[in-house]
Image (cartoon, rainbow, N blue to C red):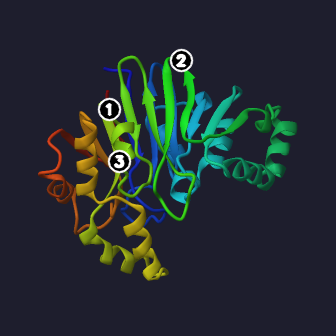
Amino acid sequence: MTQNYVVLLGTKGGPAIRPGSSMPTSNLLCLEGEQIVVDCGLGVSRGLVDQGMQLRDLSLIFITHLHSDHYLELGPLLHTAWTAGLKTRVDVYGPAGVDAYWQAFLASMRADIDLRIEDEGRPDLRDLVAIHVMDAGHVMVRNGVAVSALRTEHPPLVDTFALSFKTDGVHVVFSGDTAPLPALEDFARGADLLIHEAMLKSALPALTARVGNGSEKLMQHLLRSHTSAHDVAQTATRAGATRLALSHLIPSDDPSYGPQDWHDAVAGHYDGALIVGHDGLRIDL
């Protein structure tokens, strides 16, 4: 079995969960022995454990942007890994503001952290986590994995990023959240796997009605800040991506829509291998 793979831990677009729904966005990317977490929506800790990962081995995390369905569980994941035996450094890369989030989380948990250091003899969690504010362009190289970022179109946020992970033999791209973005075509050029957010326009009226406490602004946000499935397919085709995985599905929890609706939306726009994401789906590379 290949040691290079992606697991779509959470495939739901948006932060809310309901009985029977999938979980918000999180992913595990394994390349060249590196276990890389991409986004930390609600449920990421459980999702990693369900894949057999020891949380004490956590070492590298990327956050694409500061919407709660992508970073709500960042602090709890790091804290839980610490209680599970973490004693080595974790590098966290994310947009401006992720550093403030981490400091605020530490402040909120100070009593517990200090108590466990004193009462249980644990290392100081504050010394184990290194926060790196990233920008577009080259981000880092580690153990043969080169990471770069592309600023996406996801208003009203500005610091929102797609991420490219390259080794000598594998190229994986995460779109992050974005409206249709021509620059993503070059960014994902020849990717072995493009993991792209996707939306079904026909399902949006029912989705916004189900939310219950929003307004017409929610519909406006969805239309200006996300990408419909047929546009995703066209991006993948122009990029020459070998495989396309749809994730951050909008909607993912409406029983009136299923995998066939996503296939139908892509049909005629992309001829490569299409994967409709669901929680826990492993894609070998």
How busy is the neighbourhood of tag 3: few (under 14 within 10 Å), some, or many (20 plus)?
A: many
Give the residue drawn at x 81%, y 35%. 124
Q: Is residue 187 left or right of residue 239?
A: right
| Secondary structure of residue under mark 2 | loop
Considering only order in the chain, which callout, 2 or 3, is on the residue closer to the N terminus?
A: 2
Q: Are marks 3 and 1 in contact (CB under 8 Å)?
A: no
User: x, y (%) of residue 240?
Assistant: 24, 36
Q: Which mark is residue 191?
A: 1
Provide the secondary structure element on which disc 1 rests. Answer: loop
The N terminus sits in image quarter: top left
Residue 193 found in image quarter: top left
Q: What x and y, as percent, mark residue 150?
A: 48, 42
| Relative to 125, 152 lies left or right | left
Q: Is residue 233 above or below residue 146?
A: below
- As shown in the figure, which amino acid type bears the numbered disc 1? Ala
Residue type at numbered disc 2: Asn
Q: Position of residue 215 (x, y in %)?
A: 46, 82
Q: Report the side of 253 relative to 212 (left or right).
A: left
Is residue 255 placed above or below 247 in the rendered structure? below
Q: Which residue is mark 3?
A: 196
Measure the alpha-carbon separation of dots 3 and 1: 12 Å
Q: CA distance from mark 3 to mark 2?
A: 25 Å
Mark 3: amino acid: His
Query: Relative to 218, is 80 above or below?
Result: above
Q: Position of residue 39 (x, y in %)?
A: 51, 45
Mark closest to the chain's N terminus, 2 or 1: 2
Asked if residue 85 shows in the view, the reply is no
What residue is pinned by disc 2? 143
Q: Earlier in the sequence, mark 3 or mark 1?
A: 1
Query: Residue, x 44% and y 75% (percent of image)?
Result: 218
